[in-house]
Image: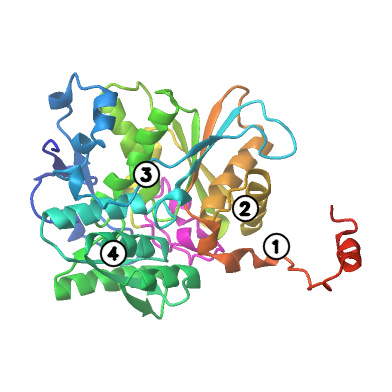
Amino acid sequence: MSTSFTYHCSDCGKLFPAGGIVYLCPECSAKQQPQQPPKGVMNISYPFEALAGITFEQLEKTQFIDLLPIEHSANLPFLKVGKTPLYNISRPDEEEIDHGLYLKDDSQNPTFSFKDRASALVSAFAKENDINTIVAASTGNAGSSLAGMCAAQGQKAIIFVPAKAPKAKLTQILMYGAVLVPVNGNYDMAFDLSIEASHRFGWYNRNTSYNPLTIEGKKTVSFELFSQLNKHLPDRIFVPVGDGVIISGVYKGFEDLLNLRFINRIPTIVAVQAEGSSNLIDNLGNDRFTMKSAKTIADSISVDIPRNFRMAAQYLSNYNGEVMRVSDQEILSASAQLSRTTGIFTEPAAAAAFAGYLKAKSDRQLTQGSENVVLLTGSGLKDLNAVQSLLSIPEAVSPDIESIEKFLNGKV
């Protein structure tokens, strides 16, 4: 059974007791201005003093229930969420490297994306509170994830998506039996409309950062990394960034471990954004957020107004995080290299993190003997159209061995 927890506003610091549905801080969100990231995003605190003496192994054995805002792990979906592979890679290209590289492959989650970590927790909370209908806005992954978790739990999912979202993701949503609401607009429009609809119809909203449980679900990746690395910390973790929730979750997980004194530092987290959608890192340190329209092949991190900008900016500042921009061409090249050299086929958003690692490696930013993790957040099968420019499917050959021999000449 979970310990008690408290919500606190990441802007004003006001505390709110657990109980019922909590979204944004009412006082801070009331001051919201147009074209600005949301104010009053909530963070969750646990009574770490009450957990003094508990071991990491004890927490791990109970699925970290004492560090999650639900009562019982039995209320999580039966699908296997988390505990994804961490691969040690010695040759990410043609040459061996003088540092450590680990790939955390969250495409191995049930709906093939990192978003299952958040959706599973939101679904469990809904189950404990007798909520049957959950709504979300998504470019595809969060929507298909919520749809899948709700299907496993016998809940109803309603998913708002930009009409131009990748067909594979829309197919997933529909196959899981969710109600799909295509919006003739971008992700930000779908996000705002889903919140308005949740108010109008009384639905529970899963939206990233708007619902503080999304950050709590995503932080579990940090617990797993700590476990899989035998309770050692990596030097750098490369994270693809759009809304800023995944990177906040990574920070939050390590911060929880820091508060429990299992670790004495936070790894350097590298926020990697596509050049065409870098609104979060472009605005770090600015007095006022300035938006530019996002345009990138990496649709999962294509965001005009990062919904968790304020919290992500705080974490990056407090723990000396690093930032990096990569071009669409670098993303596609990284996707192809990752596939060829490791057998892991990721979607462009995930490949952005690997592109960030490759750029750091090329610029000699990685010291000899350092340990580096790349967070791979989604399967390449989610968006096949994105990589078509890299491919040329051969013409069919005649069914005789001479034609085969001619076809293979120079290829093998």
The spot of residue 288 in percent (x, y) is 37, 55
Please tell me which of labels 4 and 1 falls first in the chain.
4
Please tell me which of labels 3 and 4 falls first in the chain.
3
Distance from disc 3 to disc 2, alpha carbons, whole Å, reads 23 Å
Distance from disc 3 to disc 1, alpha carbons, whole Å, reads 31 Å
Residue type at mark 4?
A: Ala
> As drawn, which residue projects farthest toward the front?
400
Residue with the mark numbered 2: 335
Please tell me which of labels 3 and 1 falls first in the chain.
3
At mark 3, the secondary structure is: loop
- Label 4 near label 3: C-beta < 8 Å? no
Judged by depth in the image, the label closer to the viewer, 3 or 2, is: 3
Q: As rendered, which of 180 and 406 lies closer to the eye?
A: 406
Residue drawn 59% across the image and 40% down it: 357
The spot of residue 346 in percent (x, y) is 55, 53
* Quadrant hosting residue 226: top left
The spot of residue 101 in percent (x, y) is 57, 33
* Quadrant hosting residue 247: top left
Residue drawn 20% across the image and 52% down it: 124
- Label 1 near label 2: C-beta < 8 Å? yes
